Structure formats: C-alpha cells, structure tokens
Image (cartoon, rainbow, N blue to C red):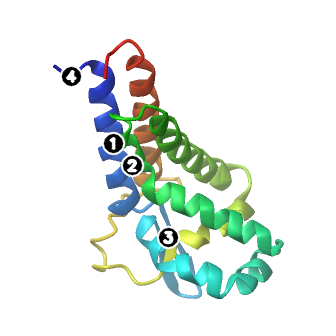
C-alpha cells in the first residue's frame, strides 16, 4: 500500500514533468517573434550555450561563467520531474528534484513583478519555433500577468514533491 508521501511525490513528479515539457512558463514577443519559454526551449538551446556562450554572455552583460552555471540549472530543471519520481527509491533525489522547480517558478514570478531585467536570463529556455503553432507548448495566459499558468504549475509540482518528501519520512520504503 502506498502512503500519502509516495502519492504526493508521484503527483509532484508528474506535474513537474508536464509543466516542464507541455506548458509554456511565459511567452514574450521580441522583434515581431513570439518566444515560448519551457523545457523544450531549454533542450534546443542547451548546445548553443557551449557553442555560442560568449554571445549569450555579451547579450546578458554577464561573465561567461554565469552562462555555464545557468547551463547546470537548465540540466537540473529538465530532469527535476524524473528526480522527483526516482525519489521513491532514493529520498534525497526528492529534495533536489523539488527545489529546482520551486526556485525557477519563484524567480520567474518575481522577475516579472520586481525585476524585469531578470527575464533575460530565462531566455536560455526560449523557443521561437513552437512544435505545433498555437497548441504546443500550451500557453495558458493569466489575465493581467506576464507569466503563464505553466510557471505556477511548475512551482506547485515542486511543492507537492517537497511535501511528499516530508510525509514520506514516516513511511518505510
């Protein structure tokens, strides 16, 4: 029988995976092109970080090592849902897999609200060519907000995983 901790970790992992790869976190229009930011864009831009890291650093106005640290954050973001699901066997993976989506969600929400220049850092997840235009990634816009519903569901998946990790302390794996 599965306890509530395992169920919450499974729900958190699935929600994080869906939020990472299906939903758009936000969409911005830049030079007449609409960029959708989500995990698919992170996959597409990952090799560009190493091939054209200097141009990213110049565009963002940061040192090159910041771009390389951002690539580590991209990797953890892309695998965070899988880490949450693997936490059913190794509990420590649940913490790592849960904190990263919470961090990304909060940074995007605060970035739009308090520091709009932070959003440039998240352009590393940007994708100008959606897989299916207008359908995938699913961009559920929130009225009077810049971020989409995918940002909140990403953070909610991380919170579910973290709560599931807490409740799983009493359970025997």
**Does residue 27 appear left or right of residue 7 in this picture?**
right
Disc with the residue nearer the chain's start (1 vs 3): 3
Mark 3 crowdedness (10 Å alpha carbons): few <14, some 14-19, many ≥20: many
Viewer-proximal residue among 122 and 9: 9
Sequence-first tag of 4 and 2: 4
What residue did someone put label 4 on? 2
Query: Alpha carbon of mark 1 to alpha carbon of mark 3: how far?
Result: 21 Å
Instruction: State yes or no: discs 3 and 4 in contact (Cβ < 8 Å).
Output: no
* Above or below, comparing residue 109 to residue 27 in the picture: above
- Percent position (x, y) of residue 20? 40, 57
Viewer-nearest residue: 130 or 165: 165
Rounded to the nearest angstrom, the CA distance separating label 1 from label 2 is 6 Å
Residue drawn 62% across and 67% down?
71
The mark closer to the camera, 1 or 3, is: 1
Tell whether label 2 touches label 3 (CB within 8 Å): no
Q: CA distance from mark 4 to mark 2?
A: 19 Å
For numbered disc 4, what is the local secondary structure?
A: loop
Task: Please tell me how crowded label 1 is: few (under 14), some (14-19), or many (20+) other residues with Cα within 10 Å.
Answer: many
Q: Position of residue 43 (x, y in %)?
A: 46, 73
Residue linked to disc 1: 85
Disc 2 target residue: 81
User: What residue is at 31 percent from the left and 23 percent from the top?
Assistant: 173
Quadrant housing the N terminus: top left
Instruction: Characterize the local packing of mark 4: few (<14), some (14-19) or many (20 or more) Cα atoms within 10 angstroms.
Output: few
Q: Earlier in the sequence, mark 3 or mark 4?
A: 4
Q: Position of residue 139 (x, y in %)?
A: 37, 63
User: Depth check: 132 or 32 in front?
Assistant: 132
Residue at (69% x, 69% y) in the render: 68
């Amino acid at each position: 029988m599965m306890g509530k901790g395992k169920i919450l970790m499974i729900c958190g992992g699935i929600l994080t995976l869906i939020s990472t790869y299906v939903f758009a976190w936000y969409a911005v229009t830049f030079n007449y092109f609409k960029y959708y930011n989500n995990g698919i864009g992170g996959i597409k831009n990952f090799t560009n970080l190493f091939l054209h890291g200097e141009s990213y650093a110049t565009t963002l106005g940061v040192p090159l090592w910041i771009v390389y640290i951002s690539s580590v954050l991209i990797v953890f973001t892309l695998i965070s849902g899988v880490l949450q699901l693997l936490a059913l066997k190794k509990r420590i993976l649940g913490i790592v897999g849960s904190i990263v989506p919470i961090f990304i969600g909060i940074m995007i929400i605060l970035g739009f609200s308090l520091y709009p220049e932070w959003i440039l850092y998240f352009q590393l997840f940007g994708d100008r060519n959606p897989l299916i235009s207008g359908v995938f990634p699913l961009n559920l816009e929130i009225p009077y907000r810049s971020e989409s519903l995918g940002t909140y569901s990403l953070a909610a998946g991380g919170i579910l995983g973290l709560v599931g990790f807490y409740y799983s302390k009493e359970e025997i794996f």
